[in-house]
Amino acid sequence: MATRQARLDEFPSQPERAAGQVFELLCEDHCGTYRLPFACCWRDGKWWNAQAGEIVDVTVIGWRQLRAAD
């Protein structure tokens, strides 16, 4: 199992979150860290589900630009 720090290292979390870009989010709760299974975008000071258009109500500890599927 990956450590918290190892997972954080995979998500560089640059302060710049340009509009129109989609991101993968690394989140954390009482059970540990996890990656959301859907793309998100940053707008109006909040994270939003890029497809559903709903606010994502989680503790986000890291983000990175969405990678194209292999």
Image (cartoon, grey):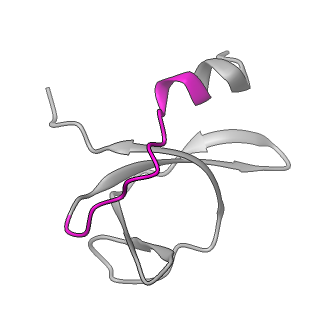
The answer to whether residue 66 is left or right of residue 42 is left
Viewer-side residue, 58 vs 44: 44
Position of residue 52 measured from the top left corner of the image (x, y, whole percent): 32, 79
Image point (34%, 52%), residue name = 23
Instruction: Look at the magenta stretch and give its main secondary structure.
Output: loop
Q: Find the residue positioned furthest to the right.
A: 30
With respect to residue 1, does 43 lie above or below? below
Examine the structure image and report whether residue 9 is included in the region drawn in magenta: yes
- Quarter residue 31 falls in: top right
Which quarter of the image is occupied by the C terminus?
top left
Which quarter of the image is occupied by the N terminus?
top right
With respect to residue 1, does 59 lie above or below? below
Examine the structure image and report whether residue 54 is included in the region drawn in magenta: no
Image point (30%, 70%), residue name = 50
With respect to residue 55, does 70 lie above or below? above
The answer to whether residue 58 is left or right of residue 17 is right
Position of residue 12 measured from the top left corner of the image (x, y, whole percent): 47, 33
Viewer-side residue, 4 vs 34: 4
**Count of marks overlaid on the render:** 0
Viewer-side residue, 60 vs 34: 60
Give the residues in magenta. Answer: 8-20
Image point (71%, 26%), residue name = 4
The answer to whether residue 22 is left or right of residue 64 is left
Position of residue 61 measured from the top left corner of the image (x, y, whole percent): 64, 47
Image point (48%, 51%), residue name = 36
